Image (cartoon, rainbow, N blue to C red):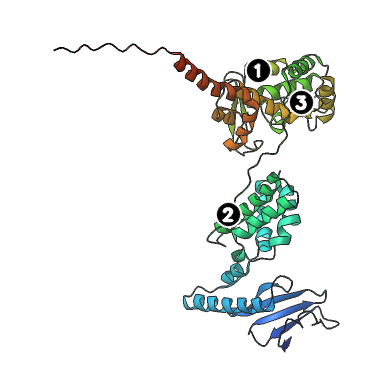
Amino acid sequence: MAIIKLTPSNLTSLKCPAGKHRIEYCDLDASGLYLLVSETDQRTFYWRTKVDGKTKHCKIGRISEITLADARAEVRRLKEQHASAAKQGNLSSDVLRIEAMTLNDLWDEYYPFAQSTVPRSVKRLEQLWRLKIKPCFGYMRLRDIHVRQLQTFLMDLRRQGLSAATADYHGALLRRMGNMAVRWGYLDVNFAKGLQLYHEFNGVENIPTDEQLKTLLEVLHTDSNRPICQLALFLLSTGLRLSAVLGARWSDINFTNKQMLLPAATAKSKRQSYIPLSESALEVLKQIDRKESDVYVFTNHKTGKKFVNIFKPWNRIRIKAGVPFLRCHDLRHCFGTYCLRGGQDLIVIAKLMSHADIRTTQRYLHASEKSLFAATNSVSDKISEVMRMKPKEVPTVVAVV
């Protein structure tokens, strides 16, 4: 430990003595403030204080993140806050830890939680955090993060060439972390409250023409690979996600009620639901070559287990049908589009497709332009009909003298 007057110029010149892992340079102008210089040349401001009779070290920030003047001002603020808390009897080590908590600290607690709640998305969340969010906000204390900074961050992502949807993924992660900080008692208000997302749909949807659909159906009814063809027909008839169909068990099917159970474990929404089965879906199920030992509806009889990846057989089938652009997931989009073209209500379609947000279902509106034109032309027809009406004859009124 060395006591010196820290200055902006000597912050970068102070060295860690040979043979030591680190050294503390205590500031003469701000009691408790010190610069920790490590043997790897990392330079970080800390504030040393005592809580419950024990020495505590509160991280202020690296010299690349905060100026000396701001570090001194932060120490003054912390002293005032802790003095006030001590008078009220609220000062504790937990208070100090929460006060010094950075977004990095919050992530260290949030990530294990995310691993258990959103296991399918956790790798994507880690990537969003590591590549973009952490470099910008990781070092910042939770109380110092403001929604204006986050909004600028999303705008910068768009300027860097990222899509609106990708920018929204970052914003959604920040919102969730802020919500957890409030839930765990680290903040009173979510730092991302009021953050405006783009909500711009940029997905790819390939809807075949009627002629292409006819050819595809002919191939699906005649190709030799019956399990994959039946699986594709079932996807088209139900609008279910591929993962849900691959994991479907015979015990989930109720032929009497014409329903299929979608367990919470396989549902993207994590909610159990019952999906009505159309006549075409039931027909597909009846045509499956089912064995008594089959647990899964679509069982790979070579392995005796469910299918894991069907890309190769499906790729051959779609090329054979002349629709090489059509992905398995597009069959789900076809279901939603055909429902809308058939005059079904958006709320009904959202329920059928297990959409948690109606905005997801609204993507199919663009595929129903004929219906929209028909609706607006019906008003034109009404106007024309009224214009063609003959005016009623006004009876002549005879004055009586």
Q: Residues within 10 Å of mark 1 (few under 14, many from 20)?
A: some
Of 314 and 256, nearer the camera is: 314
Query: Three-letter amino acid code at disc 1?
Result: Leu
Q: Is residue 253 visible?
A: no
The x, y position of residue 281, in whole percent, is 66, 19
Residue name at image x 63 percent, y 25 percent: 368
Report whether 78 appears left or right of 229.
left
Residue at horizontal 72%, vertical 79%?
A: 35
Secondary structure type for disc 1: helix
Residue 179 image label: 2
Q: Give how far apart the Cα atoms at labels 2 and 3 are.
A: 42 Å
Residue at numbered disc 3: 299
**Where's residue 44, x and y in %?**
73, 75
Assess whether mark 3 and mark 1 are in contact (beta carbons under 8 angstroms).
no
User: Circle 1 sits on which residue?
Assistant: 282
For the C terminus, give its image quadrant. top left
The total number of labels drawn is: 3
Secondary element at image label 3: strand
